Image (cartoon, grey):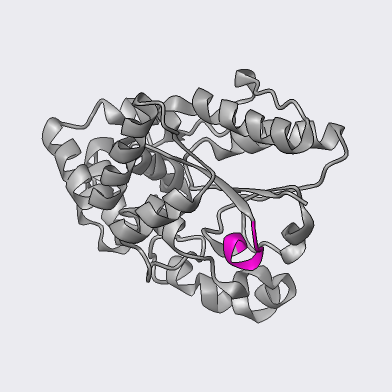
Amino acid sequence: MKQLYFLHIPKTAGKYISKNIKDCLDKNGLKSYVSTSTPNDKSFMNKTYISMHAGKYPVDKIPGLEVATLVRNPIDARVSYFNFVYNRFLFDREEYIKLNSVYDKLKFYLFEDENMLLHNNYQSRFICNSADERSFNVSSFYSNTGIDMMKPFVEDKKAFTWFVDNNNTSLENTINNLNSFNIVNTVDNIEMFENNISYWFKNNYNLEITFNKNSIINKSSTDYGDGQLLTTKDLMLMLTDNDKARIIEMNSIDQTVYELIKEKEVNNVI
């Protein structure tokens, strides 16, 4: 059985991609495993399509598994991540409460919050590392394991990592892994990615996958305390050229990888 794993890096339009694929597979009696939460379980092993925030875990478990992924401009990705997690993990921390402006909160998250360091180069981290095996034992996770695994995020206020490690993250490993994947594109060229996905299912299952832009999910808009909802685009407008340069410097692996894939797209070699 041909299987495709969408290695879903957070904040890369993955919910939209997987919804359209799953809807089509459901109609044609093909099984899928789609998850954006933890813990996961190992029922994904026999599914035609798999999507989750699990890094390389399924690749390590299923011989011959084919892989697709999307990467995003690191500046957009980091700002979008802040907009997504602020009201989930940051809003009640003293460091953020004492900052008056949204811009100051954003800058603190990007450049000064030592607890959030693992969000730098997070895209490469997902490409290079597997999720912790313990996060796939659902009964154990909810009984005892999960308490220990969540401690760094809940008690120590560290960056949530979806239990994906960081030991193997490097530019060399990221490039090597991407070269071994079957479909790799940037969010900028999501239509190219959709076409590549559609071709994969047509070639392997004679199945037409269509993508409905009206089904885009998870457009993050956040209230930072004044009743005004701000999107990632709103936050991006706050950044100075110097801010953007600092983000690129702190996310140099992700930036290099993004530029390499963009170049391949421009030259139509993906």
x then y, percent, for residue 82: 37, 44
- In the image, 60 versus 125, the foreground residue is 60
Residue 29 shown left or right of residue 154 in the figure: right
Residue displayed at 38% across by 67% down: 166
- In the image, 215 versus 56, the foreground residue is 56
x then y, percent, for residue 232: 38, 31
Q: Is residue 203 something one can see in this rendering?
A: yes
Image quarter hosting the C terminus: top left
Residue 20 shown left or right of residue 149 in the figure: right
x then y, percent, for residue 194: 58, 28
x then y, percent, for residue 185: 45, 35
In which image quadrant can residue 152 be found?
bottom left
- In the image, 21 versus 174, the foreground residue is 174
Residue displayed at 29% across by 56% down: 171
Q: Which residues are magenta?
A: 58-64
Residue displayed at 20% across by 55% down: 112
Residue displayed at 50% across by 26% down: 192
Query: Is 255 placed above or below 115 here?
Result: above
Query: Is 74 placed above or below 58 here?
Result: above
Residue 138 is covered by the magenta coloring: no
Q: How many marks?
A: 0
